Amino acid sequence: MKSRSACLFFAAIVVLSLSIPALRAEDYPARPIKLVVGAPAGTTDTIARFIAEPMAAALKQPVLVENRPGAGGNLAAAAVAKSPPDGHTLLVSFSSHTINATLYPALPYDPITDFTPITMVARVPSLLVGRAKDPEALIELAKAKPHTLTIGIGGIGSSLHLAGEKLKLMTGVDFLNVPYKGTAPALSDLLGSQIDLMFISLVTGVEQVRAGKLRAYGVTSMQRQPFFPEVPAIGEVVSGFESSAWFGVFAPANLPGAITERLNAVIVGALAEPKLREQLKNEGATAVGSSAKEFAIFIREDIERWAPLVKSSGATPN
């Protein structure tokens, strides 16, 4: 009798344990949601705040943005990776998530297995700018006198740095990298003609070009940008060139599938709205809204895409 009672007791525990994820998913969210951003004020932070508002409205809970900058986004990623997989702590990350897989010799987390991808929110191309009115002359100079054409690097291992490395590999032009502690001092030296070129965020670059302070040589997206159609895509001249930054949302690993689906539906639904698409456009971003599966595949492939470029550049963490 005792044996039968014990069996029934343990069977009840098993049934109850199996029902807990469904109950959690059904009741989600039970408290405010935190979006952890591995960067200070800037594009990643802005995109996080853009999606926080419609998420809060749809999920009927406050959605708070918490900035944890440092180590190229690694501090924020590590914190989220260790959080409970209940959908209340999410990571808003960017291209460094996949670049860092090769750039850093030892990460405190695995960029694939320690996260549940939710969706890619947006892509943001950059702009190659300089002061010379004749970019062809600059290219000829670089070929005639290798390692003399200077390009400003606002952050070693960043997507902007690696865009320059990719351009070197695909054209054979040998730029001289000039590292800076941030984009602002690099831009200052470019405006002062201390360096020749740099890749810069699309919005900042457009402002400088339209003000007549810089000349735009090309945009890093596959196609020209609709709001800046006079500037060619670099891929029009260098076949196959593309180097856009991406921004996306992750949860800790083992997030229940129903919560993953709900978060994906809420964010993708928000990205379909004209208001959010216009907000992103004003930041030089194009809304994406991928499925969780598509984003997971992209992350794996993007690590493989960046790996040879990071290695060939010789880049190491600052």
Image (tube, helix red, strand yellow):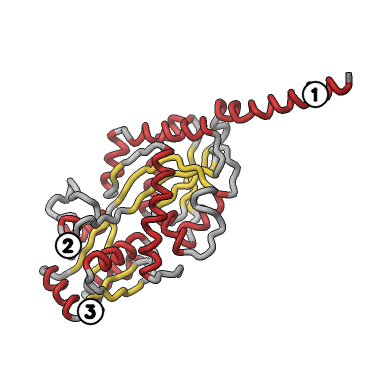
In front here: 239 or 207?
239
Numbered disc 3: secondary structure: loop
Q: Are marks 1 and 3 in contact (CB under 8 Å)?
A: no
**Mark 1 and mark 2: span between their CA atoms?**
74 Å
**Would residue 4 be found to the left or right of residue 104 on screen?**
right
Residue at the image position 15 percent from the left and 59 percent from the top: 237
Left or right: 14 as drawn, with respect to 311: right
For mark 2, what is the residue?
217
Q: Position of residue 47 (x, y in %)?
A: 37, 46
Q: In the structure shown, which secondary structural element does the residue marked by tag 1 occupy? A: helix
Label 2: state its secondary structure.
strand
Residue for point 39% across, 71% down: 314
The answer to whether any part of residue 76 appears in the image is yes
Distance between the alpha carbons at the discs numbered 1 and 3: 78 Å
Q: Which residue is mark 3?
A: 146
User: Mark 3, mark 2: which one is toward the viewer?
Assistant: 3
**Amino acid marked by disc 1:** Cys
Packing grade of label 3 (10 A; few <14, some 14-19, many >=20) is some
Query: Which amino acid type is marked by label 3?
Result: Pro
x and y, in percent, of residue 243 in the image: 29, 56
Q: Which mark is residue 7?
A: 1
Please name the amino acid that badge 2 sits on.
Answer: Tyr
Crowd tier of the residue under label 1, counting other residues whose Cα lies within 10 Å: few below 14, some 14–19, many 20 or above:
few
Above or below, 80 relative to 278 = below
Is residue 9 shown left or right of residue 197? right
